[in-house]
Image: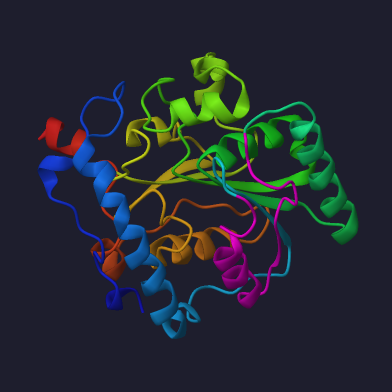
Amino acid sequence: MLATFPRLFPMPRDLAGTDPSAAPSLPLWLLEARAFVELSAFYSMSPWLRLAPAGDGHPVLVLPGLSANDLSTRPLRQFLARRGYRAHGWKLGRNFGPRPGVEDAMQARLAELHERYGRKVSIIGWSLGGMFARELARRAPEHVRSVITLGSPFAGAPHASNAWQLYELVSGQRADRWADREHAQTPPPVPATAIYSRSDGIVAWQGCLEREGPQSENIEVEGSHCGLGVNPAVLFAVADRLAQPEGEWRPFERSGLRSLVYPDPHRDSKAAAA
């Protein structure tokens, strides 16, 4: 199945951002229009996505990105429901950042799902939602099975984004609110997967990388930031990660046909060592 969508959204190599402290370039920002193509691919490739790994029915909480709401994550949640999960939105309206009461409300939502199903909850966070997801896992690891972030700049410089002004406008918070870089870059105490794209036109991709360890990893895809929640390659990777038996986490396998779809995230270091 993977061979049917190799490199659907390729990017000229010279456009990849190289400065992790700077926002993506204007050409990359303009390439965010690819999100509409990715949405079209999501619907046209639905028959093939049915071949993605099936789940075990555990609950999944999906958190939207900046200024987005549960409508933006509906395709992702529908896909997860078809794969056998109990997928839920956050039910807090638009994500305008850490306004008063929002973080406590997310914590309560997580606890409610954990109690309802009697099982740990996996959390998927898109962009800013992923930063919240990692903090939820730190606060209540006993409620969280795993965390998956989609283009979340948790390890990035405060202004390495084309959305930091919007963040400050709608949240009333400074962009450097998560200024403790060591805390932000430390993986949460649960299995964690960071999915990112080097052609992200909203945030610098380097800031979306998880510090790899015994239960943390990075998966690179090709596509836009705004299309991460519907990109077929992303959805397959998410299904693969969620399908792992609890307590038996293993890194993502990208050998064979998968190497046609998922670039090697370590290729830069390998090239430097050669």
User: Who's the residue at 90% across and 53% down the image?
Assistant: 115
> In x, y percent, where is residue 193?
50, 46
Please give left or right for residue 235 compared with residue 191 in the image.
left
Looking at the figure, which quarter contains the C terminus?
Answer: top left
Q: How many marks?
A: 0
Report the side of 40 relative to 182 (left or right). Answer: left
Q: Residue at x 28, y 42 (%)?
A: 29
Q: Position of residue 161 (x, y in %)?
A: 38, 30
How far from the left and from the top, in percent, is residue 81?
66, 72
185 within the magenta span: no
Specify whether residue 225 is in view. yes
Q: Quadrant of residue 245?
A: bottom right
| Residue 205, above or below 42 | above
Which residue is rendered at x = 65% and y = 45% of the image? 94
Relative to 226, is 242 on the left or the right? right
Give coordinates of residue 197: x percent, y percent: 33, 47
The span picked out in magenta is: 69-96
Q: Is residue 155 visible?
A: no
User: Residue, x 58% and y 30% (percent of image)?
Assistant: 170
Task: Give yes or no for residue 93 being in the magenta stretch.
Answer: yes
